[in-house]
Image (cartoon, rainbow, N blue to C red):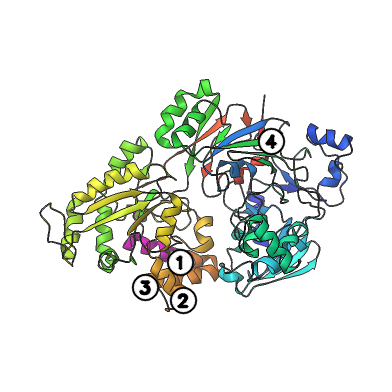
Amino acid sequence: MFAKRYWIVLVVALALSVIPAGAVLAFGEAPSLAERVAAGELAPVEERLPAEPLVITPHEAIGTYGGTMYTVAENLRGFGTDLHVIGFEPPLSITRDGLGVRPNVLKDYETEDYQTWTLYFREGMRWSDGAPFTADDMMFWWEDEVQNPEITEVVYIREFQGATIEKIDDYTVVMTLSRPFPMFEYTLATQWGYLGMWWRPKHYLQQYHPSYRDEAELHALAAEEGYDTVRELYRAMAGWSAKPIRVETPAITAFVPVEQRLETWVWERNPYYFKVDAANNQLPYIDSHVVREIRDAETIQAQIVSGQVDVEVWHTTLENFALYRANEEDGEYNTLMWQNDRGADVMLLPNQTYEDEVLAEVFRDKRFRQALSLAIDRDEINEMLYFGLATPRQYTLHPDSQFFQPEWAEAFADYDPDQANALLDDMGLTERDGAGYRLRPDGQRLAFAAEYWPSEPQTKTPIMELVKDHWAELGIDLALQPQDRSLNAQRASANQIAMNLWHGGGAIDIDWQINSRPPLPAGSITWGLGYNDWMDTDGEDGVEPPPEVERLYELADELSREIDPERRLEIGTEMWQMQADHVFHIGTVGMAPYPIIVNKDLRNIPEEGLWSSLWLHRYNPEHFFFDR
């Protein structure tokens, strides 16, 4: 059973319930599945559901079966709009209010010390091909994938390094982490988890695994399928995403792929899905989901306003809000305005460990970052690009955070070019060239490029065009280089980008505490890749961090294992105070409303919600339905 504090969360949250073990109930199912049962092609619904299916309390009403949902995506093998409707199924899930966790695939869990976690599976749950879903599938994932160097080169969650999992019975495992990890419950409840997976269909994937098949046969099969190694073959067959990406590979999601063409994927309901509504009808309500791949942004907007998509949450922009509203009647959709979790819609990341050491040294001086921030006219950005609906602010936490301090949002966020110039002069950057641009300490023009992927959000380029003009007034020559996402990631990982951009999402407590990033440098899109390398290699590689950055890492390490809530509050407050003082991330405007496009007949989607890295999943897309 849940530890005491989890019961409190579940009582106050918008709840899910479970059907008592041993109860005899009649279950409803989709007509298309009932026809297959009658024809002898499918087992009765009572045999397809687990002994204790998860009950979803509807947002509006018990739904009706039927319909096809249409969406678009830029990349069908990536994390497009289809993932928001298909859903992902982590062990736990976040409550709809975003404040706690609730059961999902796991029916229960418990821990006393935050290091040893007992996980309870649902008896009788099945994969989409009807095979039993048991603890063996988690053991296969852990022993044969995560812990197998032939398949997984690096175990990237620190607490998993040295961890163990013991199978108690077919529906119980005990996971003992390498140290206490109080945020593990939230890690269990997010879509990424461990590369989006916590289990694998052992009965299917063992045919591609070197521990279960002759090595020569596997190498031959890899070559036949066009892969150079057995690892590549296994990864391709297993999938790497939080969503199913192969028709053949069994899944536990509400929808599973049945047809995958170059530009269109078709998904149909999973007949073995483990959730029901409050009237004991098996979910999902919607029959199928068709997603079209469209890489052109303008074409996507045209599809939205012409009513060719039923729900769109990924490719909408605030700048198109008037366009969306003007076409609602003809397109037969509604435009909902949700809040978003972004502490900054766009944040700027001067690379303190950039390969150009002279420029990196300039970036490392906090006066330079403070000057850059003070030179940005955030009110102009807000009025010109956000219709005055965003909040001019420094990048920091969302105001709903328990850690938030109002002064952090104001830190070096006023438009004050005089103070900005004074800070640069105080650094000694007083010499200028014939065009009026400041000179670096080595006599070269103070010039650098912002390289970035121009989506997510699409206001990056117009914001940076304004910032470019703002900084030119300081005597700084900024170039803008939008580029393909893969190229941007490649160059960032090679430490070849002087300044990168990203959205400042994840500024709510569940997100940022899972791995304490931000405010630390994070991944390849970062303000200090070299610092990460130094810390990860104990100083054998990378760039030695200055005292304030080293302190950030110390605090993040302490936060990850601290179980006392009051001490966690102290640690988190100190970390975010450092962001306010040192401006590692430079914010622009934040908390802009986010437009959500919804077919006028689609129900159980809340009119007011929070758009975050959890996307639609806290609102249970499996219980959306068409009311026609």
Determine crowd level at label 3: few under 14, some 14-19, many 20+ residues with C-alpha closer than 10 A.
many
CA gap between label 1 and label 4 equals 48 Å
In the rendered structure, the answer to whether residue 103 lies left or right of residue 96 reads right
Q: Main secondary structure of the magenta part?
A: helix
CA gap between label 3 and label 1 equals 23 Å
First along the sequence among labels 4 and 3: 4
First along the sequence among labels 3 and 1: 3
Between 572 and 513, the one nearer to me in the picture: 513
Q: Which of the two marks, 3 or 1, is nearer to us in this view?
A: 3
Residue at the (28%, 69%) spot, across then down: 357
Between 269 and 492, the one nearer to me in the picture: 492
Q: Which residues are magenta?
A: 572-586
Quadrant for the N terminus in the image:
bottom right
First along the sequence among labels 1 and 4: 4
> Is residue 584 shown in magenta?
yes
120 lies above or below 409: below
Residue where numbered disc 2 is placed: 537
Could you tell me which secondary element the residue under label 4 belongs to?
A: strand
Residue where numbered disc 4 is placed: 288
Q: Amino acid at mark 1?
A: Glu
CA gap between label 3 and label 2 equals 13 Å
Q: Position of residue 54 (x, y in %)?
A: 74, 48
Determine crowd level at label 2: few under 14, some 14-19, many 20+ residues with C-alpha closer than 10 A.
few
Q: Which of the two marks, 3 or 2, is nearer to us in this view?
A: 2
Between 214 and 310, the one nearer to me in the picture: 214
194 lies above or below 592: below
Q: Position of residue 310 (x, y in %)?
A: 58, 31
Residue where numbered disc 1 is placed: 570
Is residue 63 something that shows in the picture? yes
